[in-house]
Amino acid sequence: MKHIYNNILQSVSVGKKLLAVLIDPDKFHLSNTEIFIKKVNESIATHIFVGGSEVDDKATEVLVNALKKYTHLPIVLFPGDVTQITDKADALLFLSLISGRNPEYLIGKHIQSVSKLEVTNLEIIPTGYILIENGKETAVQRVTDTKPLPREHVDYIADTAKAGELLGMKLIYLEAGSGAIHPVTTEIITLVKGKLRVPLIVGGGIRTKLQIENAYKAGADLVVIGTAFEEDESFFDSLKKKT
């Protein structure tokens, strides 16, 4: 697959909303793969994201290989580190943590990844990653040694997103963090979307269908769910495709 980003653009152009299921290799039990992916395939999910802040070496590749046996949905890497890169996936969100000021996550890790990326067929999608305060410390905050942007600084968040776009980012990702107490507010989503010409991803703390719909209405082009199904796989029952 070399058309994932173009497909996202096409969906945005016709107003089609997208949904990604984020799977953390360290939290997912491989023995559940077939049953779980059956639910994903029956749902309105359009993408599978794979990654986490702290993942054992090779765990990502093992998981991607297992997922590929049961789904044709595009599998996109959402890596917390260089060790999570595998050419078994279809694409890679080339994340730059533009909400923080740690050079390792602005450019350092990217340089380390070049030798791996040059020998893969991954579709590489530059993505501006913005961590927003959600009421508790997240794994991203701890691992990257950066602070999230305060939720009340809406204009600053929107300007950060626009700066990412002007730097050449093809996607902007607003992230409240795994297990967030408070998801990204609709006010933030709306203001950020109004500044951008590139697609907007929103994730973190989204646990209900209503929250997904509210994010879409506010301007999110692609919503990411993760903890919701980790805590309750029956969540997928509310997301089944209409027949």
Image (tube, rainbow, N blue to C red):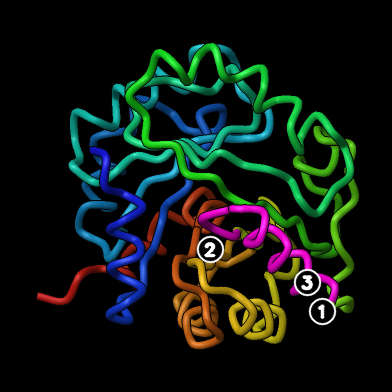
Which secondary structure lies at badge 2?
strand
Given this view, does label 2 or label 3 mark the residue nearer the observer?
Answer: 3
Label 2 environment density (alpha carbons within 10 Å; few <14, some 14–19, many ≥20): many
| Mark drawn on residue 154 | 1
Q: Which label's residue is closer to the chain start, 2 or 3?
A: 3
Q: Residue furthest left?
A: 243
What residue is rendered at 76% in x and 42% in y?
Answer: 140
- Which stretch is magenta? 156-172
Dominant secondary-structure state across the stretch colored magenta:
helix
> Viewed as shown, does residue 113 lie left or right of 161?
left
Q: Nearer the viewer, residue 26 or 195?
A: 195
Give the labeled residue for mark 3: 159
Q: Which label's residue is closer to the chain start, 2 or 1?
A: 1
Query: What's under tag 2, amino acid-wise?
Result: Ile
Return the x and y of residue 43 as percentages of the image width and height.
Answer: 26, 62
Res 146 quadrant in image: top right
What residue is rendered at 49% in x and 82% in y?
Answer: 210
Give the labeled residue for mark 2: 201
Q: Tell me whether the residue at label 2 lies in contact with that at label 3, contact meaning CB atoms closer than 8 angstroms.
A: no
Which secondary structure lies at badge 1?
helix
Query: What's under tag 1, amino acid-wise?
Result: Val
Q: Up-down: is 54 above or below 144? A: above
What residue is rendered at 35% in x and 65% in y?
Answer: 9
Which secondary structure lies at badge 3?
helix
